Amino acid sequence: MKRFDILTPFGMILGILVFAFGVISSKGVNGFLKFIDIPSIIIVFGGLTAALCISFPLKELKLMFVVIRQAFSHQDFQLGKLIDLFAHLSDRARRDGLLSLEVEIEKVDDPFIKKGILLAIDGIDPDIIIDIMTAEISAMEERHRKGRSILEKAGEYAPSWGMIGTLIGLILMLNDLNDPDSIGPSMAVAIITTLYGSLLANLFFLPLAAKLADKTEQEVFVKQVIVEGIIGVQSGQNPKLLTEKLSAFISQSDLKLTSEEYPGEEG
């Protein structure tokens, strides 16, 4: 089950508030106007867009907002229920045979679990099942990596274009050294582009990429637990032993937490 991840917008808002506090504490509310420079915004966002268009095909760029949206959701994997599910499937397979699981998997929503159980029912060799499921996990990791790489590259390009804007401002400023009064304001405007690029990279693009990488790691871990559960069911392991085996993948604190949140079905 996917839930809205409040930490992502909370972190972004907190970062913006910290930045705002730094401005207001020294210059007051009117100080914000000094941090708004249209040419700097055009240089950073325009240059960033140009760099991304060169780096990625249009098909992948169109998915950028879909990828970003994933960072605002949290996948509730319900590990306690997952372990209980495989214990139940193992018990049913030992009592009535693997073919009886065809009815059981109709109640399962996860297509990865369904695919693995169907392979087990078909009598596919365990090593081949592991190879097939592992290949699917690797393909999922690659898809996630491609989507995440756009944000990672944006995090690299944004500060660079901020620096390019600063260099443009410095060159223009050095060409006007005969007016000492303009040096200070011109320097401030030149540095604003670097600020824009750094904020975009370190408050948005790179944190979002890190969040997506963490989500991928969690999903890979859960799928590895699923593969172990499928092999355990196919090999006819005792449900209690299978539960102990799958529980070994989870820390005791996490296992206690998931068991309290998602107690297994009795009977």
Image: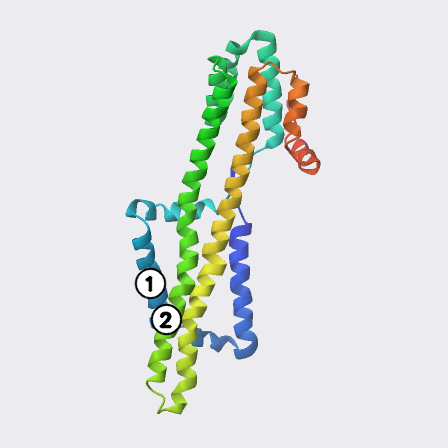
Q: Camera-side residue: 11 or 158?
A: 158
x and y, in percent, of residue 266 in the image? 66, 20
The residue under label 2 is 165
Q: Residue at x 43, y 57 (%)?
A: 155
x and y, in percent, of residue 90 in the image? 60, 16
Q: Residue at x 45, y 29 (%)?
A: 135
x and y, in percent, of residue 63 in the image? 36, 45
Residue 250 visible in this rendered orientation of the protein = yes
Task: Say if 202 sits above or below 78 in the image.
Answer: below
- Among the 4 quarters of the image, the one containing residue 33: bottom left
The residue under label 1 is 47
Q: Camera-side residue: 109 or 41?
A: 41
Whether residue 66 sits left or right of residue 259 in the image: it is left
Local secondary structure at mark 2:
helix
Whether residue 144 sits left or right of residue 52 in the image: it is right
Q: Residue at x 38, y 87 (%)?
A: 182
Task: Say if 40 sits above or below 246 in the image.
Answer: below
Q: Amino acid at mark 1?
A: Gly
Q: Amino acid at mark 2?
A: Gly
Residue 4 visible in this rendered orientation of the protein = no
Q: Residue at x 43, y 47 (%)?
A: 148
Asked if labels 2 and 1 touch by Cβ distance under 8 angstroms, the answer is yes
Whether residue 167 sits left or right of residue 255 in the image: it is left
